Image (cartoon, grey):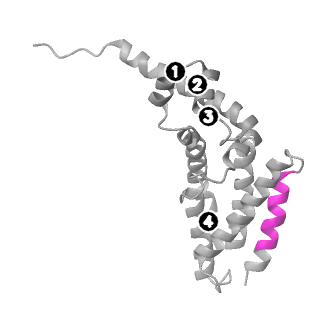
Amino acid sequence: MPAKEIKPTQKRAYHKTSETQKVIFEKAMALMSEKGFQGTTVREICAEADISIGTFYNCYKSKVDILKPVYEAGDEYFSGVCSRFEGKDAVTQLHMFGEYYAKLNVDTGIDVMRVLFYPMNEWFVQTRPMQELLLSIVSAGQVRGELRSEHDAEHIVRYIFDVLRGVCYNWCVFDGAFDIAERIEEHMALLCSALKV
């Protein structure tokens, strides 16, 4: 019996699914930036994308799953810049981290960032490459005696993210009325002056 031939339509089906995911993502982001994550239903997304609910669940596990590509892009971004931090002191690395964090938010776009700031966002509570990078910066800085060590590195990382997310949230609330990179740099300068030995 000859080997089963893979039909070209199987590849087209995958391509169609990825195109459908893209349409769903774009329509969902547009609706969510207008109505918020929690105020947007799967049914509304399906109506806007002109697809069935079954098609939606064929492409995404849930409404939360729509946000996964945003976080994967951020993970890839921070994983890609890790090597640029090597050989620099902790304070310089913290400033660099702030710059990269601001750039990621600007590149992601204010409309998408507004969608991400909802209370039950499970992606925010996961440890991601950006948190791992910041933890390594703080830990190494404490070991080398460059950063204060009254608090453990995890505590300092949580504090820094409280500040960074607060700036980003205000940037969204005030519709980008200030330069987020400048504001983050101001805050990182204050944090660094408090943290350095």
* First-in-chain label (1 vs 2): 2
Q: Is 128 situated above or below 141?
A: above
Q: Residue at x 59, y 41 (%)?
A: 67
Number of residues whose C-alpha sits closer than 10 Å to that of mark 3, classed few (under 14), some (14–19) or many (20 or more): some
**Alpha carbon separation for disc pair 4 and 3:** 35 Å
Q: Main structural element of the magenta stretch: helix, strand or loop?
A: helix
Q: Position of residue 190 (x, y in %)?
A: 82, 72
Q: Position of residue 135 (x, y in %)?
A: 58, 69
* First-in-chain label (1 vs 3): 3
Q: Which mark is residue 46?
A: 2
**Alpha carbon separation for disc pair 1 and 3:** 13 Å
* First-in-chain label (4 vs 3): 3
**Alpha carbon separation for disc pair 2 and 4:** 38 Å
| Snapshot quadrant of residue 70 | top right
Q: Which mark is residue 41?
A: 3
Q: Are marks 1 and 2 in contact (CB under 8 Å)?
A: yes
Q: Secondary structure at mark 4?
A: helix
Q: Secondary structure at mark 3?
A: loop
